[in-house]
Image (tube, rainbow, N blue to C red):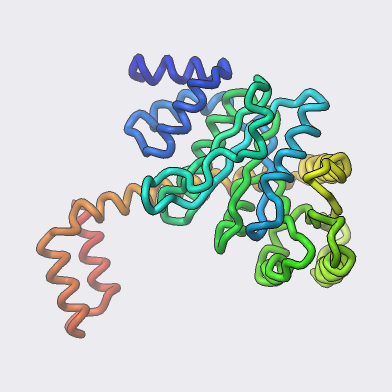
Amino acid sequence: MGADASELVARTLRGERRAVARAISLVEDGAPALREIMAGLAPRTGRAWIVGLTGSPGVGKSTSTNALVKALRARGESVGVLAVDPSSPFSGGALLGDRVRMQEHATDSGVFIRSMASRGHLGGLSWATPHALRVLDAAGFDVILVETVGVGQAEVDIAGHADTTVVLCAPGMGDSVQAAKAGVLEIADVFVVNKADREGAHATLRELRQMVSQVDRGPEEWKPPIVSTVAAKGEGAGELVERLDEHLAYLRGSGELDHRRHARAREEIEAIVLSALRERVGDVHGHAALDKLAGEVATGHGDPYSAADTLLAALER
């Protein structure tokens, strides 16, 4: 390991904020030193509890994350917050930037908050997020909260990176419940109806309860609880933490925690392999053979599978 990478690893393992921030920046940039850094951090990973929060825009994810940070800090746990945003089309940085609502924790040494852009990686969260989570895990945070903007596939992707997934809904936002019907229902470990002081909260709770009850689950399987909160006022945060604790206990007792982490490691390895393959394909993108194959497929003189086989054979040489 190079001297610079070795020093960064040592400082990250000590939980130095600048080092943690630098390591995550290297993750975003896909820096060459990333391989050495991940190898150095690996022995200290696998300890943090990763909680994902997702839901449609406007349901109050940042406010809810802020309330969770307060509740977790009140019982002495250190918290890392990773807010994953879509890439800015102009700067390539995190579109929303560091969450303004969470800035009250900026001077708390037990809290680290970072917004991170996906930078257009294939699979959205699947490439960069696991690396950033490993950095925060190795840095010694007890709990890592991963907040996504909840647009499209990101809502479902978050479940692949978290031990516990929280799906937030809000009254008057039928799209949140619609999203649950479209697939988020299956990945939620805990549902939160935020802004529960608004009109329509009871109707949203009723509809969610009905949908959850219709999912076929065995007697030993986890049934997602539904928690009402008013995150802006801190109401319901205590109950939410209790439900999260119950889910963690279930994960540990059932063996599901190990199963989820094993599956997560598989996906992370696959993502790295696919990324490497994409880079190799990019290296030959201007290759005459690829242009010739593309012309054959476009004119019907060849099929894409045979063309892909030919390209793969060229990559293996």
- Quadrant that contains the N terminus: top left
Residue 249 in which image quadrant = top right
Check the image and report above or below for 292 versus 278.
Answer: below
**Residue nearest the observer in this picture, 282 or 259:** 282
As drawn, the residue found furthest toward the left would be 288
**Residue nearest the observer in this picture, 44 or 148:** 148
Check the image and report above or below for 118 versus 43.
Answer: below
- Residue at (12, 70) in percent of width and height: 292
x then y, percent, for residue 84:
54, 46
- Residue at (64, 32) in percent of width and height: 103
The total number of labels drawn is 0
x then y, percent, for residue 125:
51, 50
- Residue at (64, 21) in percent of width and height: 107
Residue 220 in which image quadrant = bottom right
Residue 226 in which image quadrant = bottom right
- Residue at (78, 40) in percent of width and height: 252
Left or right for 162, reference 13? right
x then y, percent, for residue 108:
67, 22
